[in-house]
Amino acid sequence: MKGIIFDLDDTLVKTNLDFGAIKRDIACPSNEDILTFIGNIVCPSMKSRAHNTVLEHELHDAVTSKWLPGAQEFVQAAIQQDLPLAIVTRNCREATNIKIKNNNISIEQVITREDAPAKPDPTALLTIAAQWDIDVKHIAYVGDYIYDIQAAHNAKMQAWLYKYQADKKDYKDCLSYIAKN
């Protein structure tokens, strides 16, 4: 391994985002991705309201986030090995910055959904690999959700699934995807 990229929520820090509540608040069907749903809203004022609702949820969650057990130690061990580290998250920049500051996360390179297309699109991961000038096969993307695994596979990187508290459905979705790919 010559570099590691992390997801943020439920990989490095605990999140308390209630995605069901967010979907209800913006009238997103339960089987749709929130960011894709918002991206497909045609009416500018409805799109703006949906963005603001998600932002409210994210900012509320950001102030309560805490390191997951073992995550801080893992990051410190990687830093001691002089590995380049980055974070790629579907969070907004403002909430991400709060989580990083409040938890003293010492990873400077961060890409949010405002910086690149959201995962599972591999653009953010490939951008970091190019900046680091490291072949993607020597980079691991660590995440907890199927979008993380898909993004790593789409970038031809190693996908490291990390589930601190495994939700049975999410875990099965990830394992099913891995088995098929």
Image: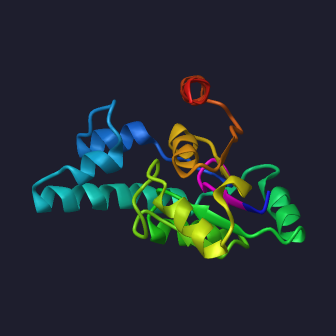
Decide if residue 137 is on the left or right side of residue 82. left
Task: Pick whichever, 180 or 97, lies toward us.
Answer: 180
Residue 19 placed where, x, y %? 42, 41
Residue depicted at 56% across the width and 44% down the height? 153
Residue 86 placed where, x, y %? 65, 67
Residue depicted at 28% across the width and 44% down the height? 25
Tell me which secondary structure the magenta stretch mostly adopts: loop
Highlighted magenta segment, given as a residue range = 4-11
Task: Pick whichever, 47 or 39, lies toward us.
Answer: 39
Residue depicted at 54% across the width and 28% down the height? 177
Indicate whether 69 appears above or below 112. Answer: above
Residue 91 placed where, x, y %? 47, 59
Quadrant location of the C terminus in the rendered image: top right
Q: Is residue 6 magenta?
A: yes
Q: Is residue 171 magenta?
A: no
Residue depicted at 62% across the width and 42% down the height? 144
Residue 175 placed where, x, y %? 61, 26
User: How many numbered circles does the render carry?
Assistant: 0
Residue 64: which quarter of the image?
A: bottom right
Quadrant location of the N terminus in the rendered image: bottom right
Decide if residue 104 is on the left or right side of residue 20. right
Residue 133: which quarter of the image?
A: bottom right
Indicate whether 143 appears above or below 167. Answer: below
Indicate whether 164 appears above or below 64. Answer: above
Colour approach in the figure: rainbow
Q: Is residue 141 visible?
A: yes
Q: Is residue 98 visible?
A: no
